[in-house]
Every structure is written in C-alpha cells, then in structure tokens.
Image (spheres, helix red, strand yellow):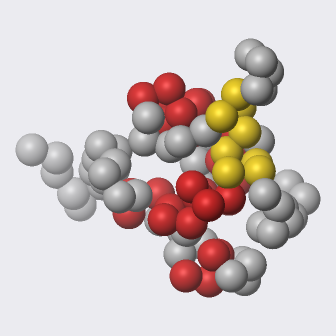
Amino acid sequence: MSAPINLNKKTFRPDEVAQILSLTRRTVYRMLHDGRLPGVRFGGGPWRILRETLIPFLSPGQATGTPTISCHRAFPGSSIPPKKKTGPDLVTV
C-alpha cells in the first residue's frame, strides 16, 4: 500500500491523483490529454492537477480530507463503461 496523500495540497502529481481516485496512472494521463481532467504543465514540465479541479471527482468525505473510497465510474461526463461481470453463473450477451 502506498503512503497516505495529504489532500490539503494545492497541486497533485498524476500518480497521486491516480491513488486518490482509485485509477491507474495511464487513465489519469488519458483524462488529462482528452480534457476530462484539467491539468497544467509549466514549461513542458510534469503535469500538475489543481485541488479545485479534483473536488467534483471526490466523494464528500474525500473533499474534506476524510479518507473514503471513490467509485471511478461515477465521474461526471465519464465515458468509462462499467465492467461487465462474467463467471460460471453470469453470461455476457
């Protein structure tokens, strides 16, 4: 398990955002590139995501600094479809 992240910071790195939102780093970079997640780059340096832009993606407990788990399928405007469950009792059509 990774070290806890201080949610009171003003900016976050993509790997921190991935941990906060329970996503992969690759998904965070995709969201940055296609505009679903606003971020800034200073002089071609690494991406930084402002805390204010993360608030709509956080559950109420996370926005106040209380650790809770967020469902990444609940992002506003997200095109990430829910995973289909498969198994011996479930059939995907």
Q: Seen in the image, is 46 located left or right of residue 54?
A: right
Residue at 50%, 62% in the rendered image: 57
Residue 14 picture location, percent across and down: 70, 39
- Decide which of 19, 43 is in the foreground and name it: 43
Q: Residue 13 is drawn in which quadrant?
A: top right
**Residue 87 showing in the rendered view:** no
Which residue is farthest top? 44
The x and y percentages for residue 63 are: 63, 75
Q: Is residue 66 above or below residue 57?
A: below
Residue closest to the eye, 52 or 29: 52
In this picture, residue 26 sits left or right of residue 6: left
91 displayed left or right of 38 = left
Q: Residue at x 38, y 63 (%)?
A: 74
Name the quarter where the N terminus is drawn.
Answer: bottom right
Would residue 92 be seen by someone viewing this image from the given angle?
yes
Quadrant where the C terminus sits is top left
**Residue at 16% over, 47% down:** 92
Q: Quadrant of residue 54?
A: bottom right
